[in-house]
Image: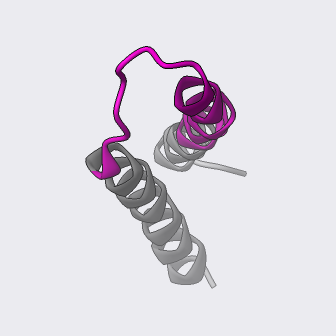
């Protein structure tokens, strides 16, 4: 049975992955269409850090229960 913390970390991971997917699909369109929007690498780093945080927390709670 999952705890509430584990469920909320799953939601954070799923939300981050979904935002990352949207970002990766939409950015090439911005690169093709000259709108003056430049790519910010800090956004990529933020997605990666949030996803890493969720994965580490879930792994800690999983292996703690074993």
Residue 30 on the magenta span: yes
Residue 63 in the figure: left or right of residue 49: right
Residue 61 among those drawn in magenta? no
- The span picked out in magenta is 15-41
Q: How many numbered callouts?
A: 0
- Please tell me which residue is depicted at 34% across the width and 33% down the height of the picture: 38
Residue at the extreme top of the image, as rendered: 35
In this picture the colour scheme is one colour
Q: Nearer the viewer, residue 26 or 30?
A: 30
Please tell me whether residue 48 is drawn above or below residue 16 in the rendered image: below
Q: Is residue 16 left or right of residue 40?
A: right
Percent x, y for residue 28?
Answer: 63, 35
Quarter holding the C terminus? bottom right
What residue is rendered at 58% in x and 77% in y?
A: 65
Locate residue 56: give its quadrant: bottom left
Residue 49, horizontal then vertical, whole percent: 36, 59
x and y percent of residue 50 in the render? 39, 51
Instruction: Name the main secondary structure of what is drawn in magenta.
Output: helix
Q: Residue at x 61, y 28 (%)?
A: 32
């Amino acid at each position: 049975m999952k705890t509430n913390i584990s469920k909320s970390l799953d939601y954070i991971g799923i939300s981050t992955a979904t935002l990352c997917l949207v970002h990766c699909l939409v950015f090439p369109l911005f690169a093709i269409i000259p709108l003056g929007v430049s790519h910010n690498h800090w956004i990529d780093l933020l997605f990666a850090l949030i996803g890493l945080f969720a994965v580490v927390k879930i792994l800690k709670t999983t292996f703690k229960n074993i």
